[in-house]
Image: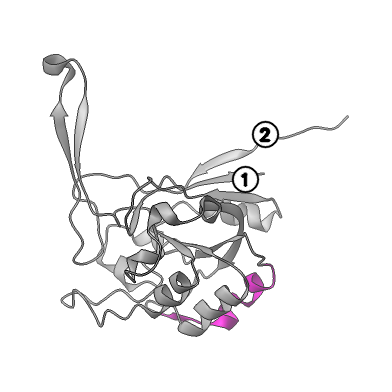
Amino acid sequence: MTTTTSPTWVDLSVPLVTGMPVYPGDPQVGIDTALRVTEDGVNVQRLHLGSQSGTHVDAPFHVDDRWPTLDEVPLDRFTGPAVVADLRGLAPRAAVTPPHLAPALERLRPGTVLVLATGWSAYWGTAHYLAHPWLTSEAARAIVDAGVRTLAVDALSVDPTPEPGDAQGDGSLPAHRILCGAGAVIAENLTNLGPVLDARAAHQPVELSLFPLRLAADGAPVRAVARVG
């Protein structure tokens, strides 16, 4: 007799709440009440937030006006089987190079979602969250050359985040430009990757979904979800 196990669904998203952390210089998040059941018959919230708030996905338009907006990106870019690069243990502001990605690069195929597990979600809400590891240009090119067009990370950005007091940095965002220039989408601020890493260790399949709102924009928050098993 064969026993089947139902898949497990894992939420990889940070909650959207008033005053939550944002990328330096981005709009602050504010959520308040617009209508109340007791007075208006329904509850409706008013949302004020940037397109890059919380767990979100970047469209190529994020870094170049000539490139596709979110609504122009093929839907299959927002889902696929996950391949995890375990980058835990790297030093603050460490550069991620192709050798760091080598075990994952060997398993990448077109249509897969590469997940960079840095462990930096543990610092969410602290100043140390800005000191995350980041992709070198060479690593970004290696990902593109492997045919991957969907990248997800449990950190604020795939490029270095400016130091406090330097709100814009140099603005070059080389990893973004290489990935987005190839038509890739980038999901940032994932959390709760523990079950995904456990599944990887147990050789269980993981499917990732990162579907955003349908906006003609540079990006949007997502409900990032992993289907394990």
The residue type indicated by label 1 comes to Val
The residue stretch that appears in magenta:
94-107
Model colouring: one colour
Disc 2 target residue: 6
Q: Is residue 198 left or right of residue 118?
A: right
Say which quadrant the N terminus sits in. top right
Amino acid type, mark 2: Ser
Report how far apart the C-alphas of labels 1 and 2 lie in the structure. Answer: 9 Å
Q: Residue at x 26, y 64 (%)?
A: 23
- The residue at the point 14 percent across, 30 percent down is 34
- Left or right: 176, with 225 as reference point: left
Residue tagged 1: 228
Q: In this orientation, does residue 156 appear?
A: no
Q: Quadrant of residue 217?
A: bottom left
Of 212 and 130, the residue lying toward us: 212
Question: In the displayed image of the protein, which residue is found farthest to the front?
Answer: 66
Residue 137, percent across and down? 46, 83
Q: Nearer the viewer, residue 118 or 97?
A: 97
Q: Position of residue 160 (x, y in %)?
A: 34, 76
Task: Pinpoint residue 211: horizontal percent, then vertical percent.
Answer: 46, 47
What label does residue 182 carry, if any?
A: none
